[in-house]
Image (cartoon, grey):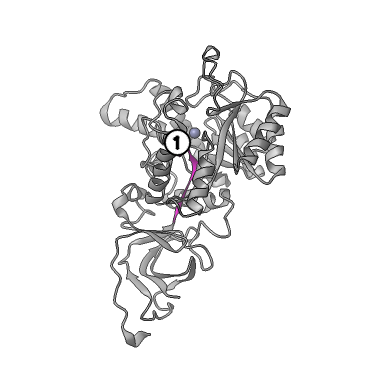
Amino acid sequence: MSRTFFRHVNLIDGINPPKKNSVVVVEGERITNVCSVADAPVPAVNDLVYDVDGRALMPGMIQCHYHVAYDNISSLFDLDLKHPPTMLTLIAAKNAELLLRCGFTGAVGAGSLHNIDVTLKQAISRGLIEGPRFLACGRDIVTTGDSVDFHPSWWKLQMEGLGRICDGPDEFRKAVRDEIKQGVDIIKLYPTGGHGLAWPADVMTMTLDEMKAAADAAHERGKKIRGHIVSKRGILAGLEANLDVIDHADMMDEECIERLVERGAFVVPSLYFPYMVVEEKRRTGRSSWSGVEEMEHGLENSRRILPKANAAGVKFVIGDDFGTAAMPHGDYAKELEAYTNGVGISPLDVIRWATINGAELLGMKNDLGTIEPGKLADLLVVNGDPSSDITVLQDRANLHVIMKGGKFVECQLTPSKVTAKAA
Ligand SMILES: [Zn+2]
């Protein structure tokens, strides 16, 4: 079998500081060698060799709060009334391919309707469409009158929309088991309001018993569970119920940090939206968004608490509500800048959130997330150095190689000639 050599790379392996003049060799779907130029094996004539001239080589990124079926959402009703299921599935398939072409070789769903995540995951693994490795999520499990239970009762829609309404531990258990029956890998709950929802952050929209019943039912069948949680009270309740992922966590404080580290739960800060709004105001002196003061205040809190939480070992991953009108699909890598320029986390740490931590949430820690011999070859060759300027990842033209499982999704490089003598 022929091999693919990437020589003279600036190696960002996900573990160590960057190493210039490294060589990475791929054979089949896996990485076989990661070494210096001096220690590299000699390529044979049928091997593909790319001399990449100091460009960065890093693991493929993993988007961990992904709504593949959000299509330019500008009101709650757009979530499930805008398109028929067939059209929405086709739109979602294009989004999945776009995510991969933006350098994200993995994704973890955060809520989808019509079982679209599951269908896409199956279509991607059968090779029907291109897309990332996928942990599929299903409908939003919520209680009667929750923010996501937004269709007026008098409409009598009776549709299987985004929200799946349950009350009491038994109904939560049944809903989780049914989602799993439909093929879902990760369950989504909405335990608190806030972060753009109608109910305020301090309102618990489900009880601890309901959350525990759902989490136990998911874990018993080897599945994961995540929750839209904003308040401190909600974060602590989510951890007590043993949720695997806390989405948003806006009101995280020192006590939450301690409990998050103890439990090993993942946190998706999803800071891109407030960062974008506050940056616009800083640049132009005004804002087109209401509530900008509250977002500035929230960003201030993030500046204080996120570096502390990162240093304490909280497992952060990246991901946000792309697919809303303000945050179109394709802008995914812009989120990374919110943590470096917005909050002061080092680019290398943010790359680790996007790669090694994401791989762990994906349940593929031993196969993905770093550049090491034996791992699957999900990797990027980047024109620029994301370890000093993370914004280079925002421009798709800089992604000179996107490789998933040893196969090129994108390759803008020209192979070097290998002489017969070297064979
Ligand atoms: Zn979301």
Magenta residues, dominant SS class: strand
The image shows residue 90 at horizontal and vertical percentages of: 41, 40
- Give the quarter of the figure containing the C terminus: bottom left
The image shows residue 404 at horizontal and vertical percentages of: 44, 58
Q: Does residue 108 lie above or below 32 as drawn?
A: above
Q: Residues within 10 Å of mark 1 (few under 14, many from 20)?
A: few
Regarding mark 1 in the picture, which secondary structure is present there?
helix
The image shows residue 70 at horizontal and vertical percentages of: 44, 34
* 63 magenta-colored: yes
- Give the quarter of the figure containing the N terminus: bottom left
Q: Does residue 267 lie above or below 371 as drawn?
A: above
Q: Nearer the viewer, residue 130 or 20?
A: 130
Is residue 340 visible from the viewing direction of this image? no
Q: Which residues are magenta?
A: 60-68
> In the picture, residue 387 is in which quadrant?
bottom left
> Is 215 on the left or on the right of 302, as rendered?
right
- Residue lying farthest to the bottom in this orientation: 421
Please give the count of numbered marks on the rendered protein: 1
Residue sitting at 38 percent across and 23 percent down? 292
Residue type highlighted by circle 1: Thr
The image shows residue 238 at horizontal and vertical percentages of: 64, 33
Residue sitting at 59 percent across and 51 percent down? 363
Q: Nearer the viewer, residue 254 or 332?
A: 332
